[in-house]
Image (spheres, rainbow, N blue to C red):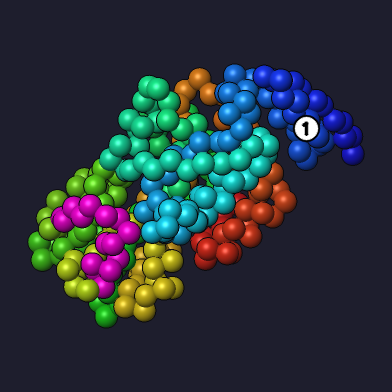
Amino acid sequence: MLVAIFCISTAGITTCCTSSDDNPVVDTQQPTIQRITERGKLLVGTTGDYRPLSYREADGNYWGFGIEMAKKIAERIGVGIEFVQTSWPTLTADVLTEPQTFDLAIGGITITDTRKETMLMSEGYLANGKTILCRSSEADRYKSLADLDKPEVRVMVNPGGLNEKFAKANLTHATIIVYQKNEEIPNQVAEGNADVMITEITEAPWYVQNNPRLAAPLLHTPFTHGEIGVLMRKGQDDLLQIVNNTIRQMKSDGTLRHLHEKYGLIYAY
């Protein structure tokens, strides 16, 4: 295997990178990568309310599948990392804001054509699809979308994201409740304050595993099919390339499969 070492000086700092067939050199002279390297850290926007992909504990520490993905990207660039709070209602605005507050956003962000019209999205690293959480005692009640779309069914969603959009487009007869804190909705369902949560196959397994009062009866037959990726503003093609290379490497060396197993998620690659 061919291996070479490159040393590049930027702002008086020399960065050395090893290039090989499996780990291509990171060109720190590309515009976005140069800015990140000179800063010394990757700024990552994340909601911190989406177990097990991105969650912010009370002490400010973040954990989750997406958080580990972000750390791998920063490691590949050769810098540290800092997480910046964003939210589902403000995600697009936060990506596009001037001055820029973070380099990329990660954690439960579905790849859509609408997002790709105005922003860049990476290749997928996690299979995704709309499903439900309900109380275990009522798991047999919900076998299809039609079973949800009834006036007596109280469907709870978080505001501003694709879950709310899906519910309002497909459940025209159900009673839809918009609840501000996504991470609290599963417990609202468990406590009987709602009947169903519209969620993703990436989120539902964690809550089922950690709360025996909850079930995900349609986990393996989701209403939609898609992938989760990394979101960033246009014009950062050099950063996008690094992100995609990181995802491909994690797929080929088994790291991505290991993360799926660690968080109990469905591996589709």
Position of residue 176 relative to residue 47, above or below, is below
Stretch in magenta: 176-190
Residue 175 versus residue 213: which sits nearer the camera? 213
Q: Which residue lies under the disc numbered 1?
A: 17
Position in image of residue 218 (x %, y %): 36, 65
Evaluate whether residue 73 shows in this view. Answer: no
Position of residue 107 relative to residue 188, above or below, is above
Position in image of residue 36 (x %, y %): 58, 28
In which quadrant of the rendered view does residue 115 lie? top left
Q: How many marks?
A: 1
Position in image of residue 269 (x %, y %): 60, 52
Q: Residue furthest right?
A: 1
Q: Residues within 10 Å of mark 1 (few under 14, many from 20)?
A: many
Please, what secondary structure does the residue beneath circle 1 have?
strand
Residue 5 colored in magenta in the image: no
Amino acid beneath label 1: Cys
Relative placement, left or right, of 2 versus 93 is right
Q: Residue at x 26, y 73 (%)?
A: 190
Position of residue 212 relative to residue 26, above or below, is below
Quadrant of the image for the N terminus? top right
In which quadrant of the rendered view does residue 76 lie? top right
Residue 123 versus residue 8: which sits nearer the camera? 8
In which quadrant of the rendered view does residue 174 lie? bottom left
Position in image of residue 173 (x %, y %): 12, 55
